[in-house]
Image: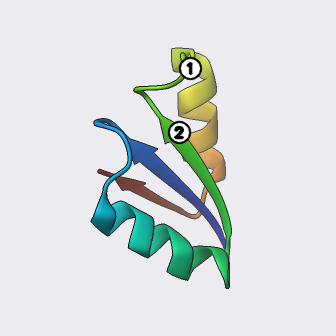
Amino acid sequence: MRVLQILTDGPGTASGDVLKLQTTEHEVEVIDFTNMDVSYEELVDKIFTSDKVISW
């Protein structure tokens, strides 16, 4: 399963714990808005190609 984690305020303890658990069983990609610029088109593409999207 492809999981996309979107961090709007940067990484936190809860998101880090969930990320560690998910990476053992799933393909996980993280977008951290505090550290990178992502185009709207790229973000929408990643959302629609993921099986699950989690926004923190």
Tell me the residue that label 1 is attached to: 38
Type of amino acid under label 2:
Ile
Vertical arrangement, residue 14 with respect to residue 40, above or below: below
The answer to the question of whether label 1 and label 2 lie on touching residues, with beta carbons closer than 8 A, is yes
Which residue appears at 59% of the width and 19% of the height? 41
* Residue 24 on image: x %, y %: 67, 83
> Is 19 positioned to the left or the right of 34 in the image?
right
Depth check: give the residue in front, 45 or 13.
Answer: 13
Find numbered disc 1 in the image and state the secondary structure of the residue it sits on: loop
Mark 2, residues whose alpha carbon is within 10 Å: few (<14), some, or many (≥20)? some
Tell me the residue at 49%/25% (across/down). Answer: 35
16 is higher (above) or lower (below) than 6: below
| Sooner in the amino-acid sequence: mark 1 or mark 2 | 2
Residue 6 horizontal side relative to residue 1, left or right: left
| Residue 53 image position (x, y, % from top left) | 45, 56
Q: Which mark is residue 31?
A: 2
Counting the numbered discs, the total is 2
Residue sitting farthest toward the front: 13
Residue 49 image point, x, y percent: 66, 49
| Picture quarter with the N terminus | bottom right
